[in-house]
Amino acid sequence: MRQESDGERWERPVALVTGGGRGLGAAIARELAPDHRLLLGARTAAGLEPILSELPDATGWPVELTDYAAVAVAVRPIERLDVLVHNAGIADLSTIAESSVQQWRDTLEANLVAVVELTRLLLPALRAANGHVVLVNSGAGLRANAGWASYAASKFGLRAFGDALRLEEPSIRVTSIHPGRIDTDMQRAIVADERRSYDPDQFLRPQTVARAIRSAIDTPRDAHPTEIVLRPW
């Protein structure tokens, strides 16, 4: 098999995946790796070591996304960006009565404000490529449940952001994907908090959601995949 030259590798479309070190983010990275130049985001370089050892052509992009000065520095080398997948986020769940102002602030900061600011900073690079922004939302971005108020609010806001971005930036495709609950470490923690036993068969596989994201990215340019909803079978 012919080896790919350095020039060919760098000419591949560039994709930045936040939260790319594990779970769904790692599955997305594996799905895009064969034909994309990957930038994989995480809070720390250590968090990226396993996936980078698996995908040696990928490049680590460690930055705390709520440290906006650091993010502004980290995006400077990115002049062209074909795909931006916003996968990073938190799920700190509680009832409204038991929640705190800080919990609401932390959730909205991580799941919405940080997404907005990273996208804003990368708009020139996305415009240069007629790029594609994928917002990993949630079923909670369509319907709020008891105990999920702050998380759902952040995801409803994320959906509104995507809708506005789609209208304001007509050269950029914007896809909001709303998966049901996914079999990840985060899900295991949520189920433990719910005091239930964990059955992975009840949840979507990360690979399935990653494949749906890949399908949206591969959609020909005459179509705009604006919203994808997935539920466990």
Image (spheres, rainbow, N blue to C red):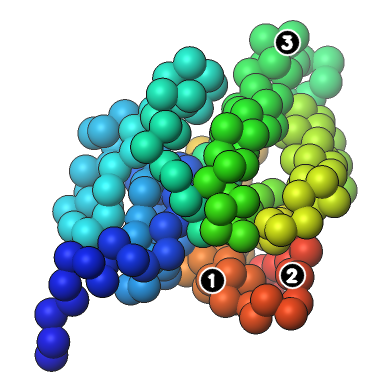
Which residue is located at x 62 percent, y 29 percent? 117
Q: Residues within 10 Å of mark 1 (few under 14, many from 20)?
A: some
Comparing 143 with 114, the one in front is 114
Figure quadrant of residue 174:
bottom right
Residue 188, compared with residue 182, is above or below; it is: above
Which amino acid is tagged 1? Arg
For the C terminus, the image quarter is bottom right
Residue receiving disc 2: 225
Q: How crowded is mark 2: few (under 14 residues within 10 Å), some or many (20 or more)?
A: some
- Position of 137 with respect to 64 (left or right) is right
Label 3 crowding class (10 Å Cα cut-off): few <14, some 14-19, many 20+?
Answer: few
Location of residue 93 (image quadrant) = top right
Please give the residue where the numbered disc 1 appears in the rendered image. 214
**SS for callout 3:** loop
State the separation of the CA atoms marked 1 and 2. Answer: 11 Å
Q: What element carries label 2?
A: loop
Q: Which of the two discs, 3 and 1, sits closer to the camera?
A: 1
- Asked if the residue under mark 2 is in contact with the one under mark 1, i.e. CB atoms within 8 Å, the reply is no
SS category of the residue bearing label 1: helix
Task: Left or right? Give the position of 58 relative to 94.
Answer: left
